[in-house]
Image (tube, helix red, strand yellow):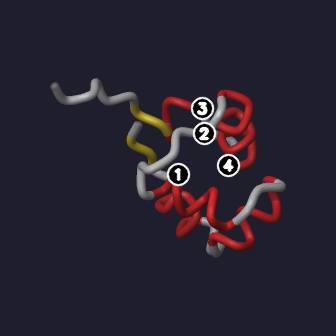
Amino acid sequence: MKNKIKVYRAMNDLTQDQLASKLSVTRQTILAIEKGKYDPSLNLAFKIARFFKVTIEEIFTYAEPRE
């Protein structure tokens, strides 16, 4: 799943550490999500969207896996 977390972090002048702290996750979790190595739970995806005051679709884009 593609995402724009890094873009929203930059627009809000937040580091990965700061965002992780506000969402009660680790910096490694934020890093893994940003790099597309980890898809967040639905609960965490909603939490991220609410934090930035946008819809989930504005941050996350589902991409069909390549075959």
10 Å crowding of disc 4: few (<14), some (14-19), many (20+): some
Question: CA–CA distance between discs 4 and 1?
Answer: 16 Å
Disc nearest the viewer among 3 and 2: 2
10 Å crowding of disc 1: few (<14), some (14-19), many (20+): some
User: Residue 40 versus residue 54: which sits nearer the camera?
Assistant: 40
For the residue labelled by badge 2, is the local secondary structure a helix, a strand or a loop? Answer: loop
Please determine whether, in this image, residue 65 is positioned above or below residue 17. above
Residue lying at 41% horizontally and 36% vertically, measured from the top left: 1
Q: If the image is split into quadrants, where does the C terminus sit?
A: top left
User: Residue 11 versus residue 18: which sits nearer the camera?
Assistant: 18
For label 3, the residue is 55
Disc nearest the viewer among 4 and 1: 1
For label 4, the residue is 52
User: Residue 33 shows which numbered tag?
Assistant: 1
- Residue 60's x, y, as percent? 48, 37
For the residue labelled by badge 4, is the local secondary structure a helix, a strand or a loop? Answer: helix
For label 2, the residue is 40
